[in-house]
Amino acid sequence: VPRKATHFSAAISAHRVFVMLSLLATTLAASPLVPNAAGKTNPVATFTVSGGVTGTFKAELMLDKLPITVSNFVDLAQSGFYNGIHFHRVIPGFMDQFGCPFAKDPNSPRAGTGGPEDGTFKNLVTGADETRSNGGNIQDELISQDSNVAGTIAMANTGQPNSGGSQIFFNVADNLNLNWWDTSTPSKHPVFAKVTEGYDLLVQISQVPTNNDNPITPIKMEKVEITGAPSK
């Protein structure tokens, strides 16, 4: 009898453990803060726009995959660099481009040619100082094969190596020819974030009336807020 009782107790305990693990797995699967491969959560950016299109959207910043690129973006966002800059180039079925400081004036003929000042920023993964140089540009981070599909955010550049700084674009189509490992074109645009909420707003932005791809009714980035980033 004791053996049967012991065996039965062990079976109950095993069943309880199984149920607890199942519940834990279900909870994690439903959570928006599921740890990445490194066991940590990535920061989230919340973008607020006004003008021709109004609303907010959110994106996960892939700090675990592109630490230099994401650290650069987080540093600029937290400094208020992006506040008040307008989208200067939007193309339906392609992408929305943003991040040039000259585009604080929505009609500036220099929109699309600017970047941040030279300087340094902290790598949020290693703690090391990273450099912006030659017009505020950072080192290309061509290390993770994340494709330029609809709903992703990638670095804009001049087409030359290490020429990205503050300008980014939001893919509203699958633009696989922009992948840095695609040899069919010289374009190399690393993806560093993916939209998690409000993608429809980006599609709406891409479809507004334009003059030479510049929205006729300006669309301004009021602010970019970062949550969940490691402390500097």
Image (cartoon, grey):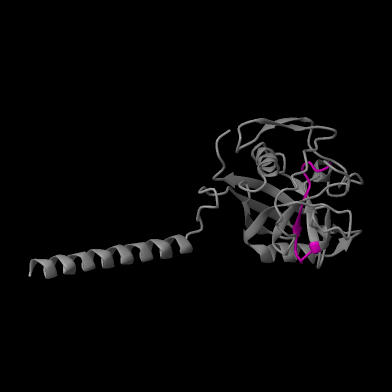
In magenta, the rendered stretch is 163-176
Question: Which quadrant: the N terminus?
Answer: bottom left
Q: Is residue 213 magenta?
A: no
Question: Which quadrant: the C terminus?
Answer: top right
**Residue 188: x %, y % from top left:** 82, 52
Residue under the point 36% across and 62% down: 21
- Quadrant of residue 55 within the rendered picture: bottom right
**Residue 122: x %, y % from top left:** 65, 33
Numbered marks: total: 0
Q: Report the predominant secondary structure element of the magenta stretch.
A: loop
**Residue 125: x %, y % from top left:** 60, 38
User: Is 179 left or right of 54, judged from the image as shown?
Assistant: right
Residue under the point 68% across and 66% down: 200
Q: Is residue 76 above or below residue 198?
A: above
Depth check, front residue: 105 or 158? 158
Q: Is residue 212 above or below residue 227?
A: below
- Quadrant of residue 56 within the rendered picture: bottom right
User: Is 44 left or right of 169, judged from the image as shown?
Assistant: left
